[in-house]
Image (tube, helix red, strand yellow):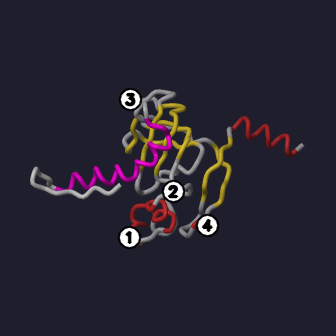
Amino acid sequence: MILWLNHLFNWYVRVVKSAFRKSYGGFESLRIVESEIPSVRATEILVQVVASSVNRTDSAVLRGKPWVFRFFTGLIRPRLATTGTDFAGIVESVGSSISEFSVGDRVYGFRDTGLGSHAEYVAVDVKEAVFTIPGSASFHDAVAMTEGAFYAVNFRKKVDLNSDSRVLVIG
């Protein structure tokens, strides 16, 4: 009887899985938990995550190191319990004030202080770095380029390059 009620609850609430931690620590501190699908606010989109990576930024957010990183992610414990900084997926619903994205759009995004994207669904504010995936790119290609492109664009804005500049590109 209890199993049947649990199954009924999971169907009604649409329980999904995500990577969860209560405190800063190593990868051994992560647990897979079930939670409700996030609801979207007026300026957010709900994305069904198809691909997400684990990168050096995820490691910093997970461990809270270097310590100064905690000013952005939570001083004593993580502000976000679910890990993940990038995603690629399909828009499942949009907030009431969203016009640039539609249900069914293929999108990808990144936030270097954590996004909670190591989950089956993530709610993302469109003010964040979220973009439509180009037609020829796969979900895996889009998520693989996200962190590097984010940092490249940010650092490019901070450097005054001209026609005499020399640049080394790795990758």
Q: Helix or strand or loop: what does disc 2 sit on?
A: loop
Residue 60 inside the magenta-drawn segment: no
Find out whether the residues at labels 3 and 1 contact each other: C-beta distance under 8 Å. Answer: no
Q: Residue sitting at 42 percent across and 57 percent down?
A: 113
The Cα atoms of the two marked residues, 3 and 1, are separated by 35 Å
Find out whether the residues at labels 3 and 2 contact each other: C-beta distance under 8 Å. Answer: no
- Quadrant location, the C terminus: bottom left
Amino acid type, residue under disc 4 in the picture: Ser
Give the class, few, some or many, for how many residues have Cα within 10 Å of label 3's Cα (few <14, many ≥20).
few
Find out whether the residues at labels 4 and 3 contact each other: C-beta distance under 8 Å. Answer: no
Amino acid type, residue under disc 2 in the picture: Val
Boundaries of the magenta span = 137-159
Amino acid type, residue under disc 3 in the picture: Glu
Q: Residue sitting at 40 percent across and 61 percent down?
A: 72
The Cα atoms of the two marked residues, 1 and 4, are separated by 21 Å
Closer to us: 156 or 162: 162
Q: List the residue tagged with mark 4.
A: 29
- Precedes in sequence: disc 3 or disc 1: 1
Q: List the residue tagged with mark 3.
A: 100
Q: Helix or strand or loop: what does disc 4 sit on?
A: helix
- Precedes in sequence: disc 1 or disc 4: 4
Is 160 on the left-hand or right-hand side of 41? left
Q: List the residue tagged with mark 1.
A: 68
Camera-side mark, 4 or 2: 2
Q: Residue sitting at 45 percent across and 29 percent down?
A: 96
Q: List the residue tagged with mark 2.
A: 54
Closer to us: 59 or 98: 59
